[in-house]
Amino acid sequence: MAIASEETTRICNHCDRAIPSSNIDLHYAHCSRNLERCKVCGDMIPKKHAEEHFLNTHAPVACSLCSETMEPEILAIHKGEICPQRIVTCDFCEFPLPAIDLAEHQEVCGNRTELCHLCNRYVRLRERYNHESRCTGIAENNEGSSRDVRAAEREQAYPRRQASEYSRRRILFTIAITGIAVLLGSLLFQKKTDSSHVH
């Protein structure tokens, strides 16, 4: 007894599929009337759905963030890695912002300083990782921040007693000027009222 599965096949000239020889004429008539090959991917698509297939599968799509047009296959990669409007977070403050603004933001944000609690020095955020890996935890007395140096210089140049005398003199001067202004104002106002009664 012969095995039925060894039936000979022929290749359809329209869809390039192997079809049993006994059905090839009927298949070809149906295939050529109802199906067409997609010019982009080569799949056989029902003719009535060819335009829908192209629009859903191959038509260029616009990125919803930046409106750039691209192939649908690369849209996910574009939105996740390339799009300038994708939301990313700052390395220093973890603030979410568009990727196009990240470099400018991090330039400013990375220059902010925070106090290192191990060595009591102010460290730029952009240098924090390197500082933490090298920090010994010992306060360095020979190097201070520029704020500390300026404060020490001011203390040496103007002791507190002189500063308090200076502020007292300034307050007295302000009171004297205010008193003179009130006195002059009242004299001028009094002259105006006297002259208005004369008429």
Image: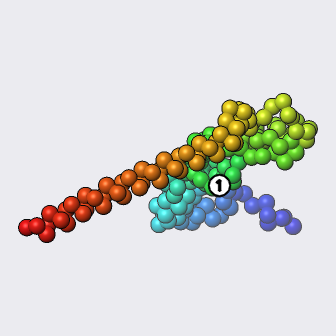
Check the image and report above or below for 88 versus 186.
above
Q: Is residue 184 visible?
A: yes
Q: Picture coordinates of residue 188 (x, y %)?
A: 25, 58
Residue at 62% across / 44% down in the picture?
A: 165
Q: Badge 1 local density, few (<14 within 10 Å), some, or many (20+)?
A: few
Q: Nearer the viewer, residue 64 or 136?
A: 136
| Percent position of residue 187, x then y | 28, 58
The picture quadrant where one finds residue 103 is top right
Residue pushed farthest left?
A: 199
Residue visible at 19% across and 66% down in the picture? 193
Q: Is residue 110 above or below residue 184?
A: above
Q: Is residue 60 visible?
A: no
Residue at horizontal 52%, vertical 55%? Answer: 65
Q: Indicate the position of residue 175 as horizontal and vertical percent values.
A: 47, 53
Residue at the spot 14% in from the left edge and 66% down from the top edge: 196
Q: Nearer the viewer, residue 8 or 137?
A: 137
Q: Residue furthest top?
A: 142
To which residue does mark 1 refer?
95
Q: Is residue 109 left or right of residue 127?
A: left
| Number of residue marks | 1
> Secondary structure under badge 1?
loop
As shown in the figure, which amino acid type bears the numbered disc 1?
Phe
